[in-house]
Image (tube, helix red, strand yellow):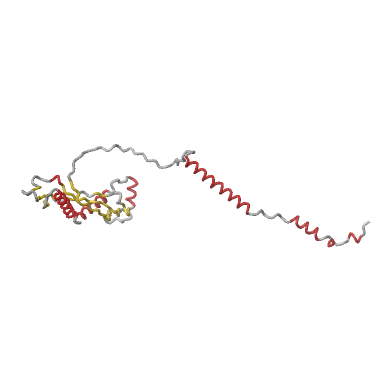
Amino acid sequence: MARDGDINEPTSSFSDTDLRADDRSEVPPAPPSSGGAARALLWVLGAAALAVVVLLGVQTTGLLPEFRNPFSKEQTDRSQPALLESMRDLSRYVAAEGNFQVVVDLQNDRRNVPDWLLNQRTLFVGSGSVEAYVDFGALTEGAIVQSADGKSVEVKLPAPQLGKTNLDLDKSYVFAEERGLLNRVGDLIGNDPNRQQQVYQLAEDRITAAARDSGLAARAEENTRKMLVGLLVSLGFEQVTVTYVAP
């Protein structure tokens, strides 16, 4: 039979080992390490990259059909064959050519109307060329006079002319454009396909005027004279005279 003294023994008599064991059983488990999640994410990314590389390689080798965009842009050309309207023989000797560039600043507006409402201003950079030629087809009888001894010859040619300005649309472009509100609304209702024609024509006129003042015709005269002198001297003439007459 147990003694009262044993029953009333204080709890401090239990060992520290039992208390520590009970405390460990109540401690919540530690959260899993984040290193596993990072490794899993790397594995997923690596597998996706490998799949893309394999797919591209197979498509390059032609084993799989080419993937096409179902909404890709398509272009259909329904143009008719070109029709030859005329043909003519040319006898022009192009002796010089000038390349020009002009900046056209054209504005069309209305008096007493603000620009934000009605205004059209275009800044256009135009590049074009002009040829200077001598028309040998216009030579008349007696244009070439040979001396009696056959040692000299005189050639009378029509004065050089300037050809039509050739505006190069591949090198020409609209640099800037300002349009009023009503102009933009008009474009939505019915766009004018010839809206830039006025700018093109103005650029051609400016280039043509610049060609006339550039000395291009005088250079064509000199180049034609050198060509004929060299040609006729090679044929045995000792003296060659080339003169130009107004058309």
Q: Position of residue 88 (x, y in %)?
A: 19, 40
> Outermost residue, right direction?
1
Q: Is residue 222 visible?
A: yes
Question: Vertical placement of 240 versus 90: above or below?
Answer: below
What is the x, y in percent for residue 187? 33, 47
Asked whether 206 or 129 is in front, the reply is: 129
For the question of whether residue 121 can be seen, the reply is no
Where residue 181 sits: x, y (%)? Answer: 34, 52
Relative to residue 48, is residue 127 drawn left or right?
left
Closer to the camera in the image, 213 or 55? 55
Seen at 90% across and 60% down, the residue is: 6
Residue 86 sits above or below residue 102 on the image: above
On screen, residue 112 versus residue 159, left or right, reads right
Is 191 or 114 nearer to us in this picture?
191
Task: Count the marks.
Answer: 0
Task: Decide which of 100, 2 is in the foreground and name it.
Answer: 100
Position of residue 7 in the picture relative to residue 154 (left or right): right
From the image, which quarter does the N terminus lie in? bottom right
Give the residue at x 12% y 49%.
Answer: 236
Residue found 40% across the figure and 42% down from its top: 73
Q: Would you place residue 154 above or below residue 3 in this image?
A: above
Q: Residue at x 34, y 46 (%)?
A: 188
Q: What x and y, as percent, mark residue 59? A: 48, 41
